[in-house]
Amino acid sequence: MCLIVFAWRPGHPVPLVLAANRDEFYARPSLPLGHWQDAEGVHAGRDLEAGGTWLGLGPNGRFAALTNIRDPGQPLGRRSRGDLVARFLTSQVSIDQYLDDIGSRAGEYSGFNLLLGAAGRLCYFNQRERLPRELASGVYGLSNAGLDTPWPKLLKAKAALAAQVDDPRPEGLLALLRDPERAADGALPDTGVGLATESLLSSVFIASENYGTRASTALIVRAEGSRRIVERSFGPYGGALGEVDLSL
């Protein structure tokens, strides 16, 4: 993923409300959200190049998602970051055990942010900081820096999510993810990719010939155990490709 905004409210009837966009080159092969035939109880999209995923649900209430850290000067990790999500969803270890393991091997991956949820907890790990955090109640956002780094699109998406959390619906969450407006040049971060690319990447929904938002995902988790996840897929220039709506 390249943008995730979420409301985390432990003890609330709807503890997790999340909206996320996966931005990627259109040529990278992947499968849309679905049940993994080789992993009982796992529902996620799948990167067919490396075998991992960017966001998904697992058995016993497991949830995981990640974003990349944008830094063109960073060394290329020898392992795919999508493996971080896939391994958690298919494992049975606790969040703490998994984070201990990731902390010792974080250097094997290019920069990432990781969200892990299970057993009424939601935890965050940043590969640069390497200090796992259990999140308290709040509205949060992740793009391609650290948690709640105030990039313009993140602030806009968080505000749009906060306006919906009292009555969350997939259609509203997906609508906030479709915003194509770019930030003003003066408000752009400098991540080393040049002004033109910073501008392209500054909108909530990215559309171009070769790179853009491939999937938008809305997730609503209820305290009684039900989960609804809706994913819309897109091609070049933001052309709609399909929708998957799962109630688990």
Image (tube, rainbow, N blue to C red):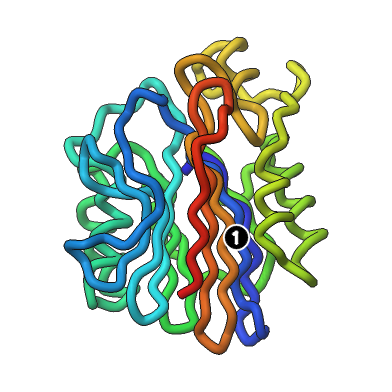
Quick check: can you spot residue 145? no
Residue, far right: 163
Mark 1: secondary structure: strand
Using the image, determine if residue 238 lies above or below residue 2.
above
Q: Position of residue 230 (x, y in %)?
A: 54, 57
Residue at position x 49%, y 82% from top?
Answer: 120
Give the class, few, some or many, for how many residues have Cα within 10 Å of label 1's Cα (few <14, many ≥20): many
- Amino acid on which disc 1 is placed: Leu
| Front-lying residue, 120 or 58 | 58
Residue at position x 42%, y 54% from top?
Answer: 55
Task: Give left or right: position of 60 versus 220.
Answer: left
Q: Which residue is mark 1?
A: 18
- For the image, the number of numbered tags is 1
Q: Position of residue 135 (x, y in %)?
A: 55, 69
Q: Position of residue 160 (x, y in %)?
A: 78, 51
Residue at position x 22%, y 57% from top?
Answer: 104
Quick check: can you spot residue 95? yes
